[in-house]
Amino acid sequence: MSKKTRKKSPKTPSRTTAKTSARKSGAGAGRAAAKASAGKSAKKPAASHAAASKALRASAWKKPPAKAAAKKTAARPAAENPAARKQHPSATSLPLSEGAEAPAFALPADAGKQVSLADYLGRKLVIFFYPRADTPGCTREAIDFTRLAGAFAKAGTAVLGVSADPLKAQEAFRDKHQLSMALASDETHDMLESYGVWGEKSMYGKTFLGILRTTVLLDRNGRIARIWRNVKVDGHADEVLAAAQAL
């Protein structure tokens, strides 16, 4: 065969070129695998963080055991605790209305006495609820009832003052102003709540629980004849006397 007719055969890649190509393809595959691995590892912590956060939220919202919750509820004072007030019989009483039977009570009073509703059956009874002993308004009110003590007695009507003050404060109040009526102490607020006179008050922009100045007139059978709420002291005792005389 002549040189002119001899065909050029294609060049076979050299070993060096093949090695270089293999290295490049290997490096590219390695980088791709590294990226895929990095992506997977980046997703795993996010998933694990999400699971941990979910577990924390679930544990934070777990309800306390029934016994512990009951103890916590019972520990709060009845005045601040709606659940306790619902269980308290006097706290669920409806507001008093005229003609209704007066709630029974038994309270310690000044001079070491005990007073109860049963003590006054057969007589008319005025109960005036005052916020605090020896304060200006309460003092004027108590003095006015003392001034009219003879007229109330002629009308067959007894007078009883009630507040949440301790007995020592009641006795000091009585002695200081020479008050004639018995003064009873309801530090537990049981009677005050049952008569609907313990409630929310406001003064100087602050809200608190206390006695709402109220007077109740009971007939001889222990039924409520008249109720005076949000009492204004001036002339009040005279108005109550007139109602007792007409009863």
Image (spheres, rainbow, N blue to C red):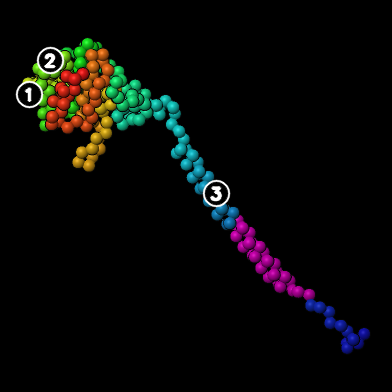
Instruction: Kindly identify which residue carries mark 3.
Output: 47
x and y percent of residue 49 in the render? 51, 48
Residue type at mark 2: give it: Lys
x and y percent of residue 53 in the render? 49, 45
Which stretch is magenta? 12-37
Instruction: Kindly identify which residue carries mark 1.
Output: 177
Q: Are marks 1 and 3 in contact (CB under 8 Å)?
A: no
Q: Secondary structure at mark 2?
A: helix
Q: Secondary structure at mark 1?
A: helix
Residue 63 visible? The answer is yes
Q: Residue at x 26, y 13 (%)?
A: 221
- The earlier-in-sequence mark between 3 and 2 is 3
Q: Are marks 3 and 2 in contact (CB under 8 Å)?
A: no
- The earlier-in-sequence mark between 1 and 3 is 3
x and y percent of residue 5 in the render? 90, 86
Instruction: Kindly identify which residue carries mark 2.
Output: 154
Q: CA distance from mark 1 to mark 3?
A: 78 Å
Q: Is residue 139 left or right of residue 65?
A: left
Q: Residue furthest bottom?
A: 4
Residue type at mark 3: give it: Ala
Q: Are marks 2 and 1 in contact (CB under 8 Å)?
A: no
- The earlier-in-sequence mark between 2 and 1 is 2
Q: Is residue 165 above or below residue 53?
A: above
- Label 2 neighbour load within 10 Å: few <14, some 14-19, many 20+: few
Quadrant placement of the N terminus: bottom right
